[in-house]
Image (tube, rainbow, N blue to C red):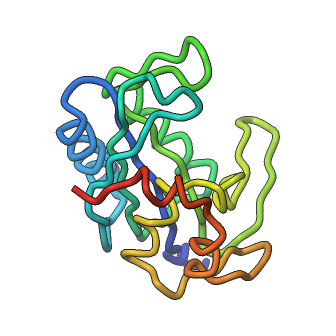
């Protein structure tokens, strides 16, 4: 029997409730407790809440991980960590202690509907400053799995106000 091969993935972690930096550090710790190896982590980035900029600001990071878990297993783990950190799902885009998204999993293109909904690469990644800039910091040669466009080019397509509204902290 062949051993499962390690896969590399990128995960975005964000928080806009409570001690945001601590929430992100706890999320990283809990992922590692669940046998996910963090290879690299971006700096913290502060961004306006989306779609309502009047909600509390977010702190976001992107991490590169090494895992033996399948995409669905990884999603389950991410969801468990969110819950362990107090995430409640009431309304879409409401403030939250922890939000964990799989951005890319081994450059695969997946659209799974059941048992959980999972789309990889993460939809709308090319419009999200809070994913693209931290991802660029740790993976300058990353390419979008669908369009094959390099991350630097994707960043150049962002609106000027999206580039101005994010800051590395």
The image position of residue 56, as x and y in percent, is 36, 26
When the figure is inspected, residue 23 is found, relative to residue 132, above or below; the finding is above
In percent of width and height, residue 104 lies at: 59, 65
Q: Residue at x 32, y 73 (%)?
A: 39
On screen, residue 83 versus residue 141, left or right, reads: left
Residue shown at 72%/74% (left/top)?
Answer: 145
Question: Which residue is at the front of the view, 100 or 17?
Answer: 17
| Residue at position x 37%, y 49% in the image | 60
Depth check: give the residue in front, 135 or 89. 135
Q: Tell which residue pokes out farthest to the bottom in this image.
A: 141
Q: Quadrant of the C terminus?
A: bottom left
User: Is residue 155 left or right of 140 when viewed as pictured?
Assistant: right
| Residue 96 x/y as whole percent | 41, 25
Quarter holding the N terminus is bottom right
Labels in figure, total: 0
Residue 100's spot in the image, x, y percent?
A: 46, 43
Residue beneath the point at 70% across and 46% down: 118
């Amino acid at each position: 029997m062949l051993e499962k091969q390690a896969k590399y993935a990128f995960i975005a972690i964000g928080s806009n409730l409570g001690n945001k930096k601590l929430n992100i550090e706890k999320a990283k710790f809990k992922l590692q407790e669940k046998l996910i190896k963090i290879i690299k982590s971006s700096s913290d980035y502060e961004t306006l809440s989306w779609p309502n900029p009047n909600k509390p600001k977010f702190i976001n990071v992107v991490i590169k991980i090494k895992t033996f878990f399948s995409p669905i297993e990884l999603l389950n783990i991410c969801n468990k960590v969110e819950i362990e950190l107090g995430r409640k799902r009431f309304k879409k885009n409401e403030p939250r202690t922890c939000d964990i998204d799989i951005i890319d999993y081994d450059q695969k293109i997946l659209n799974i509907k059941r048992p959980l909904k999972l789309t990889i690469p993460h939809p709308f990644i090319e419009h999200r400053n809070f994913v693209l800039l931290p991802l660029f910091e740790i993976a300058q040669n990353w390419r979008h799995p669908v369009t094959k466009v390099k991350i630097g080019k994707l960043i150049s397509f962002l609106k000027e106000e999206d580039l101005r509204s994010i800051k590395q902290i």
